[in-house]
Amino acid sequence: MLFRSDDPKRSSAAATLGTFYISKSNNEKAEEWLNKAVADNPKDASALATLASWQLNRGRLDEAKANAEAAAKLDPQSVQYRGLIGAVLMFQKDFAGAEKVYEELFQKQPGDFPISNQLARALVEQPDSAKQQRALQFAEMNARQFPRNPEALATLGRVYYRLGRLDDSERVLKQVLQRSE
């Protein structure tokens, strides 16, 4: 036998095979190997996060959330694993929960674009006008800092749309489309 069943190298190899099958669009084999990676070493945060990401992409939100939370519990300092929880919450339309996750991450890394961008998206989807105005501040700041970043501009367009600024939204979203041509 190459590896003991609880050897992290074994779960890493299984997770790599799962990732390989994801790239080949073979979801059955991807799931088999990702589950094997977690079964071989349930304390492998990376394997749990890889499985959670795959589940999120498949729309299996409850499973993705559970596995992302398990990964974050094993490595509480990981911004990646906490951000994965936030992403699942966004897909579940738990915008207040996502706000909490992204706010905690933003406090740790205030200059991180993906975090502030996701925080803006979580804030603007809530009915609280103060949160929506804060979303606008984040979105406009990101668009100024990253004027060629389509994600920053798309978020700004979404924020404008949610605030009823339809002309501004259309203008910004057209810029995104023109740049992608």
Image (tube, helix red, strand yellow):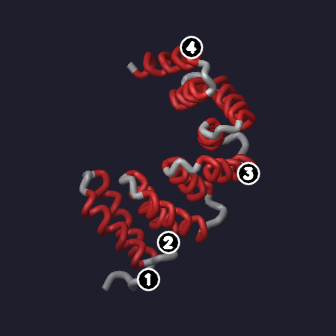
Q: Earlier in the sequence, mark 1 or mark 4?
A: 1
Please tell me whether mark 1 or mark 4 is closer to you in this view.
4
- The residue drawn where x is 65% and y is 48% is 99
Q: Which mark is residue 6?
A: 1
Which residue in the protein does label 4 denote?
Answer: 167
Spatial CA span between label 1 and label 4: 58 Å
- Residue furthest to the front in view is 127
The residue singled out by tag 2 in the image is: 44
Residue 90 vertical position relative to residue 52 in the rendered view, above or below: above
Amino acid at dot 1: Asp
Which is nearer the N-term, disc 2 or disc 3? 2
Residue 134, image quadrant: top right
Say which quadrant the N terminus sits in. bottom left
Amino acid type, mark 4 = Asp
From the viewer's side, name the closer residue of 171 and 16.
171
Judge left or right: residue 93 versus residue 57: right
Q: Determine the secondary structure under disc 4.
A: helix
Residue type at mark 3 is: Lys
**Residue 113 showing in the rendered view:** no
Task: Count every numbered label the image shows and give the total.
Answer: 4
